[in-house]
Image (spheres, grey):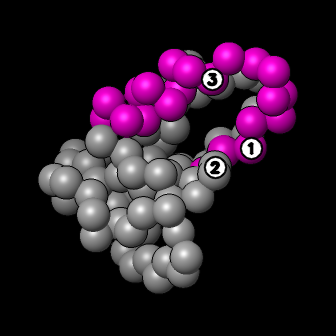
């Protein structure tokens, strides 16, 4: 099981990102901060996850998906340990 950090910069506040947030919840991601999410996945590469999420944002938005080995959160909305497998 790999841990991934998903961070985005949604540059247009008036655009509809409902499908992005619904998909993040559907795939089991947990929101850590306003624009940072965390997810545990098996048999997934950061590139694969990034390409999937790119379909749900706009061309001028930014997205980073990182496979991480250790995380030390402070005052986040949720904690990575709360992720379900």
Q: CA distance from mark 2 to mark 1?
A: 7 Å
Please name whichever residue, 55 or 13, is drawn nearer the observer in this view of the structure.
13
Residue at the location (16% across, 53% down)? 85
57 displayed left or right of 74: right
Residue bearing the label numbered 2: 35
Residue 3 lies in quadrant:
bottom left
Q: Earlier in the sequence, mark 3 or mark 1?
A: 1
Residue at the location (63% across, 51% down)? 34
Q: Give the magenta part as a residue range.
A: 7-27
Whether residue 46 is visible to the viewer of this picture, yes or no, is yes
Q: Position of residue 71 (x, y in %)?
A: 44, 77
13 displayed left or right of 51: right
Number of residues whose C-alpha sits closer than 10 Å to that of mark 3, classed few (under 14), some (14–19) or many (20 or more) = some
- Of the numbered discs in the image, which one, if any, rests on residue 29? none
Q: Position of residue 76 (x, y in %)?
A: 53, 69
Residue at the location (51% across, 19% down)? 19
Residue bearing the label numbered 1: 9
Whether pointer 2 and pointer 1 mark residues with C-beta atoms closer than 8 Å, the reply is yes
């Amino acid at each position: 099981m790999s841990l991934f950090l998903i961070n985005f910069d949604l540059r247009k506040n008036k655009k509809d990102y409902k499908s992005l947030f619904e998909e993040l919840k559907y795939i089991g991601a947990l929101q850590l901060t306003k624009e940072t999410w965390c997810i545990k996945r098996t048999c997934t590469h950061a590139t694969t996850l990034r390409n999937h999420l790119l379909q749900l944002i706009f061309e001028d938005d930014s997205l980073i998906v990182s496979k991480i080995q250790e995380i030390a959160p402070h005052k986040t909305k949720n904690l990575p340990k709360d992720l379900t497998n």
